[in-house]
Image (tube, rainbow, N blue to C red):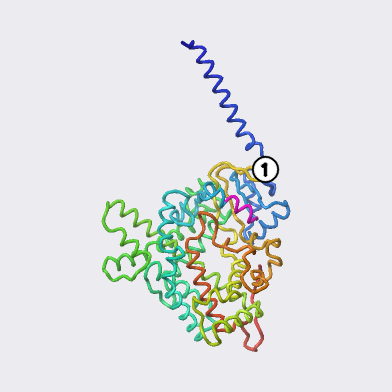
Amino acid sequence: MLDFNLLAAIAVVSLIVYLYVRQQRQLPYSMLPMPPGPKPLPVIGNILQMPTRHESQVYEQWGREYDSGIIHVDLAGTSTIIINSAAIVNELFERRSSIYSSRPRLVMVDELMGLGDFLSLIPYGEKWRAMRRLAHNELHPNAALQFRPLQVEAAHDLLQRLVVDPDSFSERIQFMAAKVIMDITYGIKTAPEGDPHIRTANLVVDAIVEASSPGAFWVEFFPLLKYVPEWIPGAGFKKKAREWHILADDMFDTPFNLAKQRFVNGVSTPSFVTKCLEALQGGDESERDYREHLIKVTSGTMFSGESTLAFLRAFILAMVLNPDVQAKAQEELDTVVGHGSLPDFGHQDSLPYVRAVIKELYRWRPLLPQGIVRMVTVEDTYDGYRIPAKSLVIPNIWAMLHDETVYPNPSVFQPERFLDAAGQIDPTVEDPQAVFGFGRRICPGRYLADATIWFTVASILATFDIGNAVNADGSSLQPWAST
């Protein structure tokens, strides 16, 4: 029988060996340098150096200065990793997606504005997976085909409105985009002028963009500030958050309650909400309430997350600035579809130049230039650099899609870059699908958005010539086109 002292000695030695091995495994992480970046100040780090305008271009310039596709900044003790390289994003967000798919705590957006259940911002976990499944069921490639008649109807309605009032193209495009997504999501027909649902959703999206920008509000770095009374000097963010909270509640509740009431009364039309509510019949009441809440917040995210409007506005600008591109696309449409005829979805594969125009549109004006910030959940390393657990990670999509080694002359709108010598889509050129995100957090509505954008762009090009506005004296007005 072993002596007790011997057993104790073995246990102590084993513990020492275990701790030593564990330390050796962890030591390389702690000794590794952080990625390069601007020198931080004590306590507040790089907060004062964070840009408030043209963020993507500043981040790209930092990458040039430090000769690195991955940059580190310190935001009051919170490590923030900025990625300018598509290769690095692919490695981290795709191959290591299990630890790079969450979202950070956003005090302003989640806790003060009431947007904690926004699908795009919710942390990775079971609730996110449940909401994602709801969206995927209606928006995956095959399911999205059911919406083509609605997309055709909305685009043709847009053409008619542009004929009557071409100067109001921005408002007409906004109405068209909202018409599609409101009908798909809630089965609600939008009002042509001043629809309140559209107005509220646009205000909420603008608020999210402003509030989630790194360095925009100090409450993100000093969360105790959220308890400061609104009347205290410097607490203006509390008033903003309160006003934005009201808008967020309105965006989630009003259209959903209307669609639900119509469903209960038996007068609803098929939509995402009605299909989900039909699947809820029966079962435990508390479970139904929870599932209904998931439907409400998922539908609100689908509606407010519509990307069609921004891309179509950018398309109008691109055609004004590049009349030669417009002429080539129109020539292709006249040849394939026929002059004076409108395209349909069956023409997609026969119109490679139009498809190249849309690819270049995505690359030239990405919707979210800095993507949506993520959080790495565990300690990690990349290329000899340490990435601490809970670091914020910003994918600089603009820099990736303006990488001159991938896209020569990136500031130039040039659809030909996506075509081969035969005039067909060149599969060897990097596809600009980064505009829709990466990995597990990629936009579930990308197929619907892409189809709407393709059909609308092709229809406008087949119908109109897009050019500069003119003054009363007939002189041309040049649009602002800063990159």
Residue 459 location, x and y as percent? 52, 80
Residue 441 location, x and y as percent? 51, 55
Task: Determine whether, in the image, residue 152 is placed left or right of residue 83.
Answer: left
Q: Quadrant of residue 303?
A: bottom left
Bin the neighbour count of mark 1 within 10 Å (Cα to Cα): few under 14, some 14-19, many 20 and up. Answer: few
Residue 437 location, x and y as percent? 55, 59
Three-letter code for the amino acid on which mark 1 is drawn: Gly
Q: Residue at x 61, y 72 (%)?
A: 356
Task: Determine whether, in the image, residue 266 is placed left or right of residue 407.
Answer: left
Asked if the magenta segment contains residue 355, the reply would be no
Closest to the observer, 294 or 403: 403
Asked if the magenta segment contains residue 90, the reply would be yes
Find disc 1 in the rendering and name its residue. Answer: 384
Closest to the observer, 314 or 38: 314
Q: Residue furthest front?
A: 422
Closest to the observer, 367 or 341: 341
Task: Determine whether, in the image, residue 260 is placed left or right of residue 129.
Answer: left
- Residue 370, compared with residue 4, is above or below; it is below
Q: What is the span of residues highlighted in magenta in the rendered image?
A: 85-92
- Residue 267, compared with residue 209, is above or below; it is below
Q: Residue at x 71, y 67 (%)?
A: 409
Secondary structure beneath dot 1 equals loop
Residue 136 location, x and y as percent? 43, 60
